Amino acid sequence: MSRPVEHHPEQRRFQIIENGILCVLDYELNGNTMIIIHTGVPQAVGGRGIAADLTMHALDTARQKGWLVRPVCSYADAYIRRHKEDYADLLA
């Protein structure tokens, strides 16, 4: 189930608030490359697909903006590997 994801470009962050708990995907921009540096979902709301929703939204945003992606975050890297048919072309 996909949740609404908020993008805060000034903070270089995508976020979801689940049951009052902040879940985030943080990134940096280097030219036209989005460097995904951290995905954080607290254990209290883990196992619900929140990290996947954040990552999917970040990758879709990168595609819309014409950015390449470098997944430093191990979760984002694994997500792209699992969905390589959808996102491998974004890899920097």
Image (tube, rainbow, N blue to C red):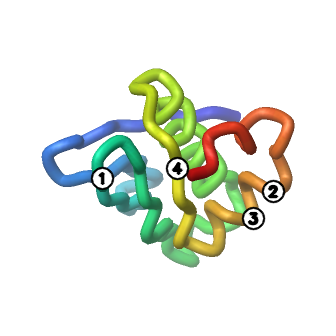
**Amino acid at circle 4:** Val
Classify 81 as above or below 84: below
Cβ atoms at labels 3 and 2 below 8 Å apart:
yes
Tag 1's secondary structure? strand
Q: Which residue is mark 4?
A: 69
Location of mark 1 (residue): 29
Q: Secondary structure at mark 3?
A: helix
Per the image, label 2 sits on a secondary structure element best described as helix
Identified by mark 2, the residue type is Arg
Q: Nearer the viewer, mark 1 or mark 3?
A: 1
Q: Is residue 86 left or right of residue 60?
A: right
Residues under labels 3 and 2: Cα distance?
5 Å
Residue at mark 2 = 81
Q: Do the residues bearing badges 4 and 1 touch, measured as CB atoms within 8 Å?
A: no
Residue at (41% x, 50% y) in the render = 34
Q: Residue at x 59, y 57 (%)?
A: 51
Q: Earlier in the sequence, mark 4 or mark 3?
A: 4
Q: Amino acid at mark 3?
A: Ala
Quadrant (top left/top right/bottom left/bottom right) for the N terminus:
top right
Instruction: Tell me the CA gap for discs 4 and 1.
Output: 9 Å
Residue 3, image x and y in percent?
54, 35
Dot 3 alpha-carbon crowd within 10 angstroms: few under 14, some 14 to 19, many 20 or more? few
Residue under pointer 3: 78
